[in-house]
Amino acid sequence: MANVHEYFWKHNGPPTGTHETSLRFTKPLKEGSTFADLRNGRTYIVVAISKVNETDIKHTPKEMIHTSDAKPIPEQQLMTMRDAHKYDADPDWPYLILQPI
């Protein structure tokens, strides 16, 4: 498996409908990155990334992302993205980093 980049997640907006407190990606996020939730088509823009204070727990994310809502993905495009990224085959990885919009 590719490298895993894990983050704590703080969303600066209305509730996301999901209850994740942490996210993981195969590529690192940067400020200004946009990612999509392939379950519902919602997208989020990363407005800040901050370091997490050291903890005694060995496998916790080292960074926190702060997000705001971005433009949702239309249903037809969402279905195409799900097919292209084999969403049904790996439902534990529902988030996808998008190219800059």
Image (cartoon, helix red, strand yellow):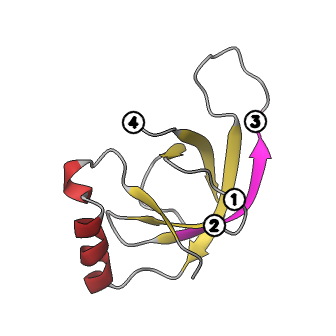
The answer to whether the residues at label 1 and label 2 have Cβ atoms under 8 Å apart is yes
Q: CA distance from mark 1 to mark 2?
A: 5 Å
**1 or 3: mark nearer the eye:** 1
In the image, residue 75 lies in the stretch drawn in magenta: no
Q: Which mark is residue 30?
A: 1
**Sequence-wise, which precedes: disc 1 or disc 3?**
1
What residue did someone put label 4 on? 1
What x and y, as percent, mark residue 98?
A: 50, 70
Q: Secondary structure at mark 2?
A: loop
**4 or 1: mark nearer the eye:** 4
The answer to whether the residues at label 3 and label 4 have Cβ atoms under 8 Å apart is no
The residue under label 1 is which amino acid type? Lys
- Residue 56 falls in which quadrant of the image? top right
What residue did someone put label 2 on? 33
What residue did someone put label 3 on? 52
Q: CA distance from mark 1 to mark 3?
A: 16 Å
Indicate left or right for 42 with 81 as reference.
right
The residue under label 4 is which amino acid type? Met
Please count the marks in the image.
Answer: 4
What x and y, as percent, mark residue 22?
A: 54, 42
**2 or 4: mark nearer the eye:** 4
**2 or 3: mark nearer the eye:** 2
**Sequence-wise, which precedes: disc 2 or disc 4?**
4
- Of 93 and 2, nearer the camera is 2
Q: CA distance from mark 3 to mark 4?
A: 25 Å
Q: CA distance from mark 2 to mark 4?
A: 22 Å
Q: Quadrant of the C terminus?
A: bottom right
**Sequence-wise, which precedes: disc 4 or disc 1?**
4
**Sequence-wise, which precedes: disc 3 or disc 4?**
4
Q: How packed is label 3: few (under 14 Cα within 10 Å), some, or many (20 or more)?
A: some
Is residue 58 shown above or below 29? above
Q: CA distance from mark 4 to mark 1?
A: 21 Å
